[in-house]
Amino acid sequence: MLHIVNKSPLERPALTACLRIAEPGTILLIEDGVYAAARGAAGETPLREAMTRHKVCVLLPDAEARAIGDRLIDGVTTVDYGGFVDLVAENRNCQSWL
Amino acid sequence: MSEGTAKKFMFVNRSAPYGTVYALESLEVVLISAAFDQDVSLVFVEDGVWQLKKGQQTKGIETKNFSPTYRALEGYDVEKLYVEQESLAARGLTEDDLIVDVTVLSSADLGKLMGEQDVVLSF
């Protein structure tokens, strides 16, 4: 299953709830959700823990727009818009933690 | 629509009832789905659990109290209501505080149920 998170982890608990509930699968961070993947930020520890169970992807255009494209946590997978579409297509279902 | 073509729809409610319109909109879409004989589940997590809190009195905010509608869902064959235990506990609530009978699930069980759905809609 694909889980999409678009909120900063410091602003809203969307990622926290997602990580608590989601079965092992794929998590895609988009929009302000990408801040969770910034090295050294508060989201790093929970995200690293999540990466032991999930594949974690970041929408690169959103990360680059926020100037964190070059400081993403090692091990996250970056995707472009085409990759975003592929993730939606290859997963059975999808939950957007808006 | 025959039972063979019914899809499993899950509505994930994550917002408190009156601060935004999400809860009310979710309820309307749930009723529409039920009218099409789909297999509908409602989930209440995070502040969404406040939607089911007993004793809502909305006269003072001049807004319709739609919480009685959750009791009416049974009449539309919407009987699968799930609440996440962690979300209840974090808000000082127990099952007794809720206006309808629900199934309380652990986060893990809820995640499993979510994975089994054909369509997941988030409100």
Image (cartoon, rainbow, N blue to C red):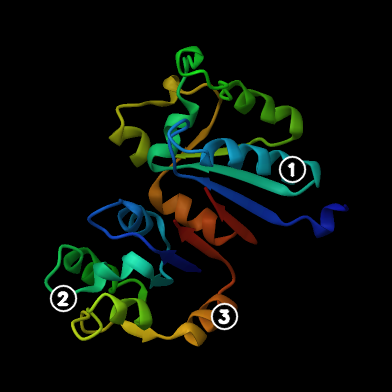
Is mark 1 in CB contact (under 8 Å) with mark 2?
A: no
According to the picture, the residue beneath numbered tag 1 turns out to be B32
Residue A74: x %, y % from top left: 21, 84
Residue A46: x %, y % from top left: 22, 63
Chain ID of residue with mark 2: A
Which of marks 2 and 3 precedes in the sequence? Answer: 2
Q: Nearer the viewer, residue B74 or A76?
A: A76
Furthest toward the right, the residue is B2
Q: CA distance from mark 1 to mark 3?
A: 28 Å
Q: Residue at x 75, y 49 (%)?
A: B38
B2 vs A58, left or right, is right
Crowd band around label 3 with a 10 angstrom C-alpha radius: few (<14), some (14–19), many (20+): few
Is mark 3 in CB contact (under 8 Å) with mark 2?
A: no
- Do the residues at pointers 1 and 3 share their chain? no
A44 vs B68, left or right, is left
Chain ID of residue with mark 3: A
Amino acid type, mark 3: Glu
Q: Residue at x 30, y 71 (%)?
A: A34
According to the picture, the residue beneath numbered tag 3 turns out to be A90
User: What secondary structure is found at the residue carrying circle 3?
Assistant: helix
Which quarter of the picture shows residue A8?
bottom left
A4 vs B101, left or right, is left
Crowd band around label 1 with a 10 angstrom C-alpha radius: few (<14), some (14–19), many (20+): few
Q: Nearer the viewer, residue B111 or A45?
A: A45
Q: Is residue B20 above or below residue B93?
A: below
User: What secondary structure is found at the residue carrying circle 2?
Assistant: loop
Q: CA distance from mark 3 to mark 2?
A: 28 Å
Amino acid type, mark 1: Ile
Q: Residue at x 26, y 58 (%)?
A: A9
Residue B62: x %, y % from top left: 51, 18
Is mark 1 in CB contact (under 8 Å) with mark 3?
A: no
Q: CA distance from mark 1 to mark 2?
A: 44 Å
